[in-house]
Amino acid sequence: MASDAVSASNTIYRKHEPHFTVETNNATELVATAAGNIERLLANRSEALKVSRLAAEAEKFQMEHVWRDGSEVSELISSLMPKKRNRYIPDDFEEDPDFKRLVSYNTTAVHIPTDIYEGSTIILNELNWTEALEDVFRKNKEEDPSLLWQVFGSATGLARYYPASPWTNSSNLPNKIDLYDVRRRPWYIQGAASPKDMLILVDASGSVSGLTLKLIRQSVGKMLETLSDDDFVNVLFFNEGANNASCFQNLVQANVRNKNKLKADVNKITAKGITNYKAGFEMAFKQLAQTNVARANCNKIIMLFTDGGEEKAEEIFKVRIFTFSVGQHNYDKGPIQWMACTNKGYYYEIPSIGATRINTQEYLDVLGRPMVKESRKAKQVQWTNVYLDALELGLVITGTLPVFNKTGMGTKKPALFIQQMSYLVQGVQICSSLFPFFFLQFGPNGYYFAIDPNGYVLLHPNLQPLTLEFADPVTLDFLDAELENDIKVQIRKKMIDAETGSYTIDTLVKSQDERYIDVGKRTYTFAPVKGTDYSTEPNFNLVIHFFFHYSITFASHRMYCKDLKPDKKKNNTEFLMDFNDFIDTKTPNHPLCEDGVLARFVATDGGITRVYPKSAGLSWKEDAETYESSFYKRSLDNDLPTRVDDSILVSKAVHIETNGIALKPAVVGVKLDISAWMASFINTTYRMDNVDCSILDDGGFLVMSNQDDDISQIGRFFGIIDPALMAELLNESLFDIKKTFDYQSTCDPKKESKAAAGLRSVYVPTIADMLNVGWWSFFLMMEDEMSDGKHKQACITEQTQYFFADDRVTFAGKIDCLNCSRMYHAEKLPRTNLVFIIADNRGSCLACTSKPITQEEKPSEGPDPCILSNNPRYRKGPAVCFDNTEHEEDPDCGGASGLSPSLWLMVALQLVLLWVLTGSRHHAIPS
């Protein structure tokens, strides 16, 4: 039936051949055009940051600002009371089609983290001087209406963005605690300092047992969150000796998986023995000195977490040392403060759990000092990894430009790196810059993708994170987005090295519905995007229109060329109706042709799907966009694929050749009635009561069976139905397997044991905690995270796909069990993706039972990061490194955070703060 449809389709195409021409794509030209389009888009955004003098204006406004004292504190606090909250909600918000949310172009908005006291003097002053940025933001938008969010992010945590929009929690849950902090956003972290080689040194001596060790663990976890994928890190702990906290023997890339592994293993550290700083520092310097392992090769820093002590490292090193005195104790802080001040670092105190978040991120200000001194050289726009926008614009990248506090330039005052300017670019905007090339030039199995120097994809059809959390950047490696092989490893390396090239390879391809693996031929052509760190490469709701009453035609939503003007003498609708009429006249109408056939269909490269008869079209479930349809894409790589769910779909690509060029412009097929075909199959094998007759497809899914009990199993994986026979087919290499991981999936949260829950509940806040605004927010954040357990969480899932291992046709053998055996014979059916299997009935040898073999996705820990760290993937860091500490004389190398409120004020404000943190608080505060 499918073959007849192919012949008929060929006849139709031949008849209309004078009406179309066929041209071969030049992949090299297309990728050069795509790279050029992306280059111009990002260059325009970079120039907007530079030419508009946005950063320069910010520095100017900051220098001209006259510092004010804290006399406005009471005014701000009173404004936060419920009776005056409406003053923070402008009445000119309107729904915007670009942002798909309420915005106001008449003002900016401000966001301040929950654990930052809004009434502090420094916050009030920043609110004052950054207000002048509003006019600059507005002018930029007027000059380039395509600009999206423009954001100023400060080292104090204040973020001013334009246009103004109500702040929205991604979960859309009432009373959801706002965890957003601009200083922990991917674009801020990547732009705040040059890449880091960080060694975290944890004091695990007996003196830190109890609450101090708990604070250290929490602090190390927060410290790890300040690192980006351009950084490298490891954690050591020491008492009498020194050891790696995890399985990592050297510095490892600070990607999400490695950081999660380190966090988990830090929580396993126990306190015992005496303190031996020398052992810890010796091991730390040894790892930092290694040159034969992957590393950032820029800022070398040691982070020491301890409760203090009398011993200190006497040597002065060419490594910044930051020291953290953790917990409440009476130890002399002088030795560890000396270590920090002598080695161009900084000394911090973390007396309680509320201080962990703030005091583990302020070190970025110190690392920014070399950038401030270089000033002009450091004014380079950096483009980030892909991440999820906090205000729901989806996947975005951001260009950032540093802004420096120059009030101390030329003096001995601290050179404070204070803020970032950023412009955001949606993935949709990048895709639009590729159109019309992006979608249609390469056919349904072709696509563009781009990667950054870490090998992470900026664009890729498989870049589809399911989680709505925005805490981490979306880092999907090219080799994880596709099925890895040696040639793709080479392609990835050449793209990172900004080379130009092309490869044509045979590669495994996962089907759109992720049930099957096929071998397809793919051509990869690549070129660098100049002026950026990216490299790009091409790899070659239903609208229903009714025509007559014989069939239904589906048209996909596509962005067809808006400037294409049709010939007035030709009517597209009339042509399509004539085409449908022609098909109707060629459709066989003999009654025997209808037995067991639910529908006939043709799906075209142009996005048109025709289903006959009309009754079948009304229940048609396939994607109207043929480029997103699994059966359509598989048909282009396979001769006659069959797919089974609630019916059997058999399809075949139409092959035509014009002027020596082979085309596959359509896929034709039939949809079969399972019940009718099963009845016929059972009738054919009715004398074979002692054997199981089964037909499987190339993914191991049951298509037909002669057993009545298996009718309800049609479409299920055969490893669930007959595990023993499926295991034998795997052993005999009828099937091969490919295990794949999905790094963008979501899972139900893990259930905590009662013991684990008990441990969390025993924390008792100290007086210092209760007088610290940070503790209130941290406590509520912790409660909020616990309440999140009812919702899906980001996770890794593992799936196993099955496929025919080789070209052998016949397979036979015997399954030996305890006291019986089962004979089987398997034969691949010619010109299909099916295999017919006859075997002794499952009930004839009950001893032949085994554990079910599954195919569906299941939660997984993913590849072992300990093994991956031994052979890290190739990457490149930024070309410029700012880590010069020469002539750096900063007298400020330790003390409390400038944002910490005074004790007397905190006592007076407890009731107000409780209302602010537990009530519905608007963080978007228009100026």
Image (spheres, rainbow, N blue to C red):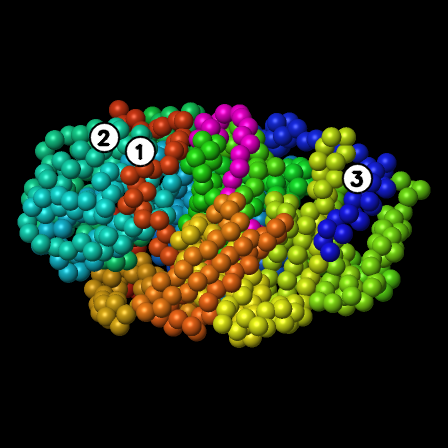
Answer whether residue 96 is visible to the viewer in this image.
Answer: no
Q: Amino acid at mark 2?
A: Gln
- Which residue, as the protein is rendered here, is positioned at the far bottom? 709
Residue 512 covered by magenta stretch: yes
For the residues labelled 1 and 3, the Cα–Cα distance comes to 51 Å
Residue 295 circle label? 1
SS class, disc 1? loop
Q: CA distance from mark 2 to mark 1?
A: 9 Å
> Which structural element holds mark 3?
loop
Q: Disc 3 versus disc 2: distance between alpha carbons?
A: 59 Å
Pair 3/2: label in front: 2
Within-10-Å neighbours for mark 3: few <14, some 14–19, many 20+? few
Q: Residue furthest front?
A: 687
Vertical arrangement, residue 291 with respect to residue 19, above or below: above
Magenta span: 492-515
Q: Residue at x 41, y 27 (%)?
A: 879
| Residue labelled with disc 2 | 290
Tell me which amino acid carries mark 3: Asp
Q: Residue 342's x, y, as percent?
A: 17, 33
Amino acid type assigned to the residue bearing label 1 in the image: Arg
Query: Residue 563's mark?
Result: 3
The quarter of the picture where residue 540 lies is top right
Q: Residue at x 30, y 41 (%)?
A: 869
Earlier along the polypeptide chain: callout 3 or callout 2?
2
Where residue 103 sits: x, y (%)?
Answer: 60, 54
Side (left or right) of 272 relative to 805 = left
- The N terminus is located in which quarter? bottom right
The answer to whether marks 2 and 1 mark residues whose Cβ atoms lie closer than 8 Å is yes
Q: Position of residue 908 (x, y in %)?
A: 30, 64
